[in-house]
Structure formats: C-alpha cells, structure tokens
Amino acid sequence: MKRIVLIILGIVLLSAAGFGAYTLGTRLGEPEPTAIMGTAFQNPVDVSDVTLKTAGEKSVSLADYQGKVTLVFFGFTRCPDVCPLTLSRLSKLRDDLAQPDDLQVVMITVDPEFDTPDIANAYASGFNPSFVGLSGSNSDIAKVMERFYVGAAGMGTEQYFHTDVVFVLNRDAQMKYLYSQADMQYLEDNVKTLLKQKNW
C-alpha cells in the first residue's frame, strides 16, 4: 500500500513539474526552437561574388541579396519533373510565410544553350514574381556549378541529370546549408526560424 502511494505521489509530482514548465514557456512566449534539418557546411562558402545574367542581359550578383536569406536551386526550363516541383514548393513556402521581403529565391540554369537569361528569368518568375532566373555562357555556368559543387550530365541535350538540392545562403551570401529533396519537408519551418535571426 505504501509503495502504491509513493508511485501515485511520484506521478503527481512529475505532472506538476511538466505543467509548470509548460506554463512558464507559455508565459515567456518563446516557442520551442525548430531544429535545422539541412546538411550544414562546416566552413560556410562565400558565393557573394557569383555574377550571372537575368532578363534583359542585366548582371546580377548574389551579393545583391545580402541582408536576405537566399535559396538557390539549379535546374532548367525544359525539366519535366523535379524542377517545376521544387519551384512550386518554394513558391508555396513563400506564400505560407506571407511573402517575406528578406527571403529571395534564385534559380540558376544548367542548360545555358537553351535557357537564355530572358527564358530562365521568365520561367522562374512564372512560379512567383519575386523569383529570379539566372543564366550565362557555358563557361560562366560551369564555373558557378563548380563553386556550388553541382553536377549535371547531358549538356547540350534536352534532358539533364543534375544535382537537385536547394542551397540556403545566409545574409552575407555564404552557403550555410543544403536540402536534399528528402529534406524539403523541413525547409519551410527551418526558413521561418532563420528569418527570425536577423544577424544570421
């Protein structure tokens, strides 16, 4: 009988402690931090100097987006599956986060022979008016792909096999995380967390 009383007392004390912690958290108004699920770069890579072309042959540097959290995706406009799916998901992400001013999405083509700057930008902005599509010469694109550790096979054809991750750049235009397609389910919550970190 005494043992049963001790067990019940223990349960009551644990419940009270749990309720107290919950109440304190609620009063402080601090939500539980969201774990960053992307793959982190041990040493963030500065890509602020990467410069390509957008509509009207206008030069765009990733440094232009310093002060923002920037999501970079490599794709191509004739892609039948992963590219439109990924850009659609990124568009939904922006909608769900109420179109934050300090979030930028950039698509860089892996098919510069077909995807001129005008075509690349029209394609990207078709998913969301704020999206920017970038292209350049074959040499320019090859150098940028190397900077991002991106691979593509099938250059010069209508179909490409390419790295389909989403890179997350911090507000200094440094590569901090990458998200595989399997990790995309966590990206929205993680971006929401990162946007709150103004010095990130």
Image (tube, rainbow, N blue to C red):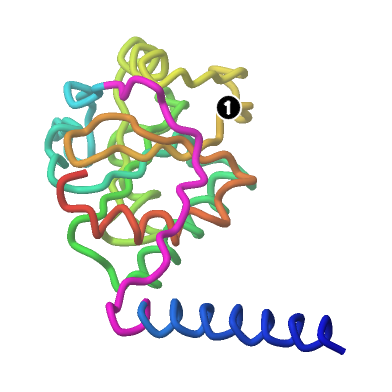
What's the residue at 57%, 56% (across, down)?
A: 185
User: Tag 1, which secondary structure?
Assistant: strand
Query: Is 42 included in the stretch rendered in magenta?
Result: yes
- Residue 164 among those drawn in magenta: no
The image position of residue 172, as x and y in percent, is 17, 34
Residue 113, x across and y down, in percent: 42, 23
Residue segment shown in magenta: 25-45
Q: Residues within 10 Å of mark 1 (few under 14, many from 20)?
A: some
Q: Position of residue 104 (x, y in %)?
A: 26, 50
In the figure, is residue 100 to the left or right of 83? left
Residue in the foreground of this view, choosing between 118 and 144? 144
Instruction: State left or right for residue 11 relative to residue 65.
Output: right
The residue depicted at 51 percent of the width and 79 percent of the height is: 17
**Whole-percent x, y for residue 102 in the image:** 19, 56
Q: What's the residue type where badge 1 is placed?
A: His
**Which quarter shows the C terminus?**
top left
Q: Based on the displayed image, in which of its 4 quarters is residue 153 positioned?
A: top right
Residue, disc 1: 162
Up-down: is 33 above or below 21?
above
Q: Which residue is rendered at x = 40% and y = 85% of the image? A: 23
Task: Determine whether 35 is above or below 98 in the image.
Answer: above
**Residue farthest front in this picture:** 2
Q: Residue at x 23, y 37 (%)?
A: 54
